[in-house]
Image: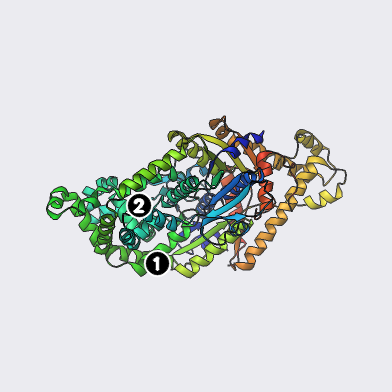
Amino acid sequence: MEVSRFCSTARLLIVAGKGGVGKTTVTAALARAAARAGLSSLIVEVEGKSGIGAVFGRREVLSYEEVLLHPGGGPDGDADVRGRTLTPDDALLEYLEDHGMRRVSKRLAGSGALDVVSTAVPGIKDILVLGKVKQLERAAAADVIVLDAPAAGHAVTFLTSARGLLDAARVGPIRAQAADVVALLSDPARCQVLLVTLPEETPVNEVVETAFALEDRVGIKLGPVVVNGLYPPLPGLAEALSGAASVNGPVRAAAEFRLARERLQQEQVARLADVLPLPQLHLPFLFTPEVGPLELERMVDALVAQIEALPS
Amino acid sequence: MSSALEALLSQSVVVCCGSGGVGKTTTAAALAVEGARRGRRACVVTIDPAKRLADALGLASLTNVASEVKGPWEPPGSLSALMLDTKSTFDALIATYATSPSQARTILENPLYRNIAGALSGTQEYMAMEKLYELVAAASFDLIVVDTPPTRNALDFVDAPRRLTRFLDNRVFRLLMMPTRAYLKAVGLATQTFLRTVSRVVGSEVVADAVAFFQAFDGMEQGFRDRAAAVQELLRAPGTSFVLVTSPRRDAVEEATFFASRLRESAISVDGLIVNRLHPRFGADGAKGADRADGAVDGEGVLFDNLRDFEAIASREEQHFAALASRVAPAPVARVPFLADDVHDVEGLVEVGAHLFGGAPGPSAPG
């Protein structure tokens, strides 16, 4: 499948997964893949502490104001990648200001009264964040909006709270907002979720659980599952090892380690394919503990190749 | 080297903190297992263990009561485990401080209370500390190891008690409980506008529930404040140690560094740094390996390429957490390599313990 088609299936791509699976890297790689295909992209992160900036070689964390993370417009026809953060507190303040509370919202935020409200109506913060995302999507803030969803089990809560509120909420603007968010999440032409996982036992179990929860409870359209951190194949390694009986010590140990881990990873990939009938996008382990601009472009290369290998 | 962590095993409380996905739960369980193997009556408080580990520890479901786990313990050592149930811990706390059973009932049935117990940010962290306090007070264990919730604000437990008491003291809602005339005088125009808007936006029942909750809670604040202070004191007691758990990935190390400075601000010292999921080092003759690559027999070069990949990642990982290690110095650092498979039984935990406290075999192929 062409990358431009993949990225324009839905304007909103939500990237979700547990902590430590490389969700932020995948978010950045998707945005850059879209930009390489000439589609402008906007990265939205919702926790106010993401490492998105560092992936693009910036020191600062994202802010509520949009910034240019990777300029396009060069001879290669790339589009821009921009980024911003969107925390519940910001969204709540903006919502209150939009509803005629400009004068008092800041002061009340300081008094803790807003804590009481968001506790009294759990999920209200998620609705406000997603409501703002919906606004960006409706306004076509970019050709592709990539949302780096909250980590851990919170991703499910985050994406299901609109449905929950809709069932429970009693009246008014919040109910309307929740209805809009549910409409967005359950429309495959507007929104797709990409789950990210590692080829290991617990992450695979968890991604399967998350996938079923999201489909059952939100009716959300799941895109391919991204399996991150696969050891890239080293052609000829196994043959070289069995052919070189004289090679010992660290060289042999390292080869055995890699082959054994590759085998374990393949087992997990196969198990995932068995229980979760979704296409998979495989991303390589880069033999580095950090992802900066150089590593990101290698990830984008890999992602583009994987997307192009998907059936149209 | 890593046996310097041994001091932890003679503490009464060890709190493990770190971001999600770094093997915190497994580390906490391994510390308790090692304690039990050395004759201590150990208990691990887990938050959200992976299913097979939970099964191995006899934690099929939320159990707020510690249950004993069988294993190769050195008498009188024992291992118990429990999985935190935030809501029933909170319910028990309400029952303790309510002045009458009917007050407790009114609170427990209030919709706002149910949300506080289930959804107020920081409640889970607070209840983990509350449970810890109860276990310490009961004095049935020598060593209690606590896992912390995998939120980005994993350090909320340091502030959580204070945040909750602040919530309970909320001025706006306290004002609502005043007799009408005083209320009108005290509540500013801004507050009235706010409450009207809140009613309009989320429904007047929400405001009514909140008012009813604060009314029902009246008289219990002092008990909560005292308890929160006692918990804070326990966290700073000399018998309590904090351990940072991380993986060598940049984001995890950054998070751990952030935790380290937050703990320092709270006057809590870090007594150990545990780095999980490290790539193994395959020996010191890396340079020799590179030499041989040049003259390698056709087809063997790939073996040396592979070794170089692993040497590169191992040194970069080491560099990555070196700054963190020196920041928490003189706290000892323990390194745990990538393990063959997920840890899901007591034997696996013993193996992790061997890496933490020395005596582990060198790197070997998994599988």
Q: Residues within 10 Å of mark 2 (few under 14, many from 20)?
A: some
Instruction: From the viewer's side, name the closer residue of A14 and B346.
Output: B346
User: At which x and y percent is residue A300?
Assistant: 57, 51
* Up-down relation of residue B276 to residue B99 (above or below): above
Q: Is residue A75 above or below residue B103?
A: above
Q: Where is residue A221 shown, x and y percent of the image?
A: 49, 67
Rendered location of residue A87, percent (x, y): 38, 50
Q: Quadrant of residue A199?
A: bottom right
Front tag of 2 and 1: 2
Residue A141 image-quadrant placement: bottom left
Tell me if B163 is positioned left or right of A144 in this view. left
Q: Position of residue A122 (x, y in %)?
A: 36, 59
| Residue in the image at 64% along x and 40% along y | B335
Instruction: Tell how many labels.
Output: 2
Q: Which amino acid, mark 2?
A: Tyr
Is residue A176 at least partly visible in the picture?
yes
In the image, B151 versus A57, the foreground residue is B151
Is the C terminus of chain A in the top left, top right, bottom left or bottom right quadrant? bottom right
Helix or strand or loop: what does disc 2 sit on?
helix
The numbered dot on residue A131 is: none
According to the image, label 1 marks what residue?
Answer: A163
Looking at the rendered structure, whether the residues under marks 2 and 1 are on a common chain is answered as no
Answer yes or no: is residue A221 visible: no
Q: Amino acid at mark 1?
A: Arg
Q: What is the CA distance from the residue labelled 2 to the residue labelled 1?
A: 36 Å
The N terminus of chain A, quarter of image: bottom right
Chain ID at mark 2: B
Q: Nearer the viewer, residue B150 or B126?
A: B126
Q: Residue at x 15, y 52 (%)?
A: B183
User: Which of B233 and B309 lies nearest the eye of the viewer?
Assistant: B233
Mark 2 — residue? B97
